[in-house]
Amino acid sequence: MLPGKEHKTTALGLPQKEKIGTFAFFDIEHFIRRLLKNWYWFALMAILAYGISYIYEKYYAQRVYQSSLSLSISNNTAAYFTPNQSINFIWGQSGNQDGLFLKKMLLSRTHNEFLVNQLNLYTNYSTKGLIKQTYLDRSDSPVSLEVDRTHLQQLNYAITLIPKGGDKYEVVLPEEGQSTNLYNYQIEGFKSIGSFARPNNKIISIGQWFESPNLKFKLVKNTVESGIKLDNIIIKLSSVNDSVNQIIGTLTVDFDKEIATIMNISKSGYNLNGTVNFLNTSIEELKTKRLKDNNTVDKNTQIYLTQNIEGIKKKLDSSARYMNDLKVTEKLYDIENLDTRSLERIKTLEAKKAGLMVSINSLNQIKNTLASQNLDKLISTNAAGINDGIFDATVSELKALYLKRREMATIYTPDSEPMREINRLINEARTGSNGSIKNYYSGYYTEIQRINNEIAGLNGDLSTYPEKQRKYLDAERGYNMIQAAYNTLMTKQNETDIRIQSAKSDITIIDEAKNLGQGPIGPNIGGTKYSIFGGFLLLPLLILLFTEALDSKIRNIKELVSATKIPLLGVIGSSTHENNLTVLETPQSSISEAFRGIRANLRFLSNDDGKSKVILVTSSVGGEGKTFISINIASVLGLSGKKTILLGMDLRKPKIFGDFNINNKYGISNYLTGEVSLDEIINKTKIEGLDVATAGPIPPNPSELLMSAKNFGLIEELKKSYDYIIIDSPPVGLVADSFELMKHSDANIYVVRHEYTEKYMLKMITEKYYNDEVENLGIVYNDFSVKQGYGYGYGYGYGYGYGYGYGYFDEDKNYEEPTLIKIKNLVKRIFNRK
């Protein structure tokens, strides 16, 4: 039996009408089939992605390498340029101030600018093959370029050196691109000149100057041969500022998690040798510079402490004489009943106060030196009890800025933009250092005030002593304070003397940077290749997904039946016949067999009471095969011995006459207007049991004619003579004529064409069917053609046209088994052998 109506209801007993005729938004089964059908696009994209990935990896990906260096920081120096572990004014506090200072110095512009100018790091070397350009270290090149810093130079201008044998190289310059805005390495600024012609290429020897309006340099032979044979060497100049920024951006400084005084420094770059050489040179230069600076500061501190010790010693001697005089004159050799506990506490507090006063005096010296701008006279921050790496780094930066301003003052006027900029930087550094000094002053004075308050409280306990004894105790306390200050200065002097005598760098290299053949750290070539493959494979996937989401055509028989719940009479395969007479002209075809199946299923739509049956065939729109289905159903009924007539009632678009080669001069439209009789419009065919009445000429009022009483009378009249009346009616999606005709039909066939009929078109007919406005309705699925390995889908479902026995149908004569099926069957035969 064919499926009938299923009125599903909700919990309240109401029918779920909103789900009738509703199709799934996305057909995953069809999408997967579509992916498999378009496999070649994915294969093509994969091949293309592989080619692009190969070219990217071999010719375009610039590998980034990284080398590392580890060092330890000792605490045997004291200066702005290397803070140590002296007493912090916040008692008991300590930290890795040396490491923080060194990190700031390594990443500072001052240090890296010094390296750029000292090592000519503004020259960038590379070589180029047919496609790819490879970056070189200066040591990889047989020669290096030395520019004349007094001459204007053009930046980012490719200077190509081509070896000519011996010590000769041809200098090849770009055909265009010369600039009149040139760079001066002395003032680190640009200057414009007049236009000039392109410099000529020239062959020069090592040590020979090449000079043009925009360049002046000579070649210097590297002392160590790299062993790399280069066809060309490309050199570009960059500004000092750009070089410094590029270096700082590739440096990372981290501290060891277990030992805070161990520092790990890394540098990345396009050339491994370049990163190794930079790190080792950078640290060696830093050690040398720091040792020199540290000795200068320590010697300044030694002089300062010596001068203060001499002054304090005089005060100490004077205080001792005064105290002795009191003992003699006042005869105070022994004071009885002393509160020794209070006196000892006062002595301790005053000794601490004396140390703070020494630190304040040292801080005054530092402040005055900073104000004088003569930083060569700076003393160690140890003398002021300061341990602040940030403050020391700020002072170090300030010193470099003062030196820079003195150099620039010989070139620029005081009101020029470069001088205003350097003054702005100096003011910022000075503001930072002054702010730190104020904080230390505040801390020292706060501590002194606290000590004074405590001493004042203790002095109350001594107020009961006789005046002579109090006088002596005051003298003794003064002596003790001076002695404490003297001892503090002597301790600091001893520390300074030891540092001077055992002067050495506070940096010890644990592991120097080496070229151990480290692999590149970037770019992530593997990830990039996967991204390329993913992107290319995703492109056809997205296109197919997008088109599938927008595709609203009927493609799935199972979904059609599930959504409409309308009985499926049969499935007709894709016809390649030259006309619509498939059943008549190819009776052994699979399509003909499918129509025989439909003929068998038609009995389920109407009662087999032996009376004449009227079968109406319609569809949503034109082009769905309505006429094709009508002709072949009529043919298969006529061939079965049933007297059948085919009526062409699609008066707006008559077609039937062409397939049967009948003159359409007179037809149903003529009969309905009274022009001709019924016998005049009935045409015989070569099938004895099949007659045809064509539509006739297109009338001006087709709807009125079809819905006229005469038309309905025509149908009743034909029932008397024929077993089956097949009506080829207009599409219901365009006009409503067919719905009126359905009231006079016994069975209705609705034609749906595979991959042609839109899903939304079935909404109306499905609703009418479930509202009982249309009865005895069945669907014929037309033009179904899916290649699934067993040929085309001739037969679907209901026990007809299976198409598995090759040779059964006419189409199987030319059937060739697909390659995948051949392989599958071969595997089966191999494993089924006994």
Image (spheres, helix red, strand yellow):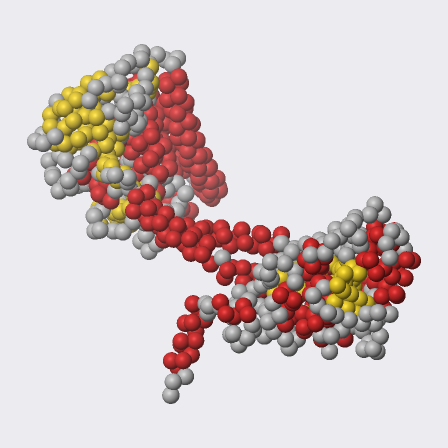
Question: From this viewpoint, which residue is outermost toward the bottom?
Answer: 834
Q: Quadrant of the C terminus?
A: bottom left
Q: Residue at x 79, y 69 (%)?
A: 724
Q: Nearer the viewer, residue 101 or 112?
A: 112
Q: Is residue 691 left or right of residue 128?
A: right
Q: Quadrant of residue 711?
A: bottom right
Question: From this viewpoint, which residue is outermost toward the right?
Answer: 709
Q: Quadrant of residue 211?
A: top left
Q: Quadrant of the N terminus?
A: bottom right
Q: Is residue 692 left or right of residue 827?
A: right
- Image x and y of residue 581, in percent: 65, 62
Q: Nearer the viewer, residue 297 or 778?
A: 778
- Image x and y of residue 385, in percent: 34, 38
- Image x and y of residue 109, in percent: 33, 32
Q: Nearer the viewer, residue 393 or 24?
A: 24
Q: Does 108 appear above or below 92?
A: above
- Image x and y of residue 434, in percent: 41, 29
Q: Residue at x 27, y 25 (%)?
A: 174
User: Does residue 84 show up?
Assistant: no
Q: Does 74 appear above or below 316?
A: below
Q: Residue at x 81, y 77 (%)?
A: 608
Q: Is residue 734 left or right of residue 471?
A: right
Q: Nearer the viewer, residue 321 or 28?
A: 28
> What number of labels is visible?
0
Q: Does 361 appear above or below 543?
A: above
User: Does residue 427 show up?
Assistant: yes
Q: Does 319 appear above or below 460?
A: above
Q: Residue at x 33, y 35 (%)?
A: 246
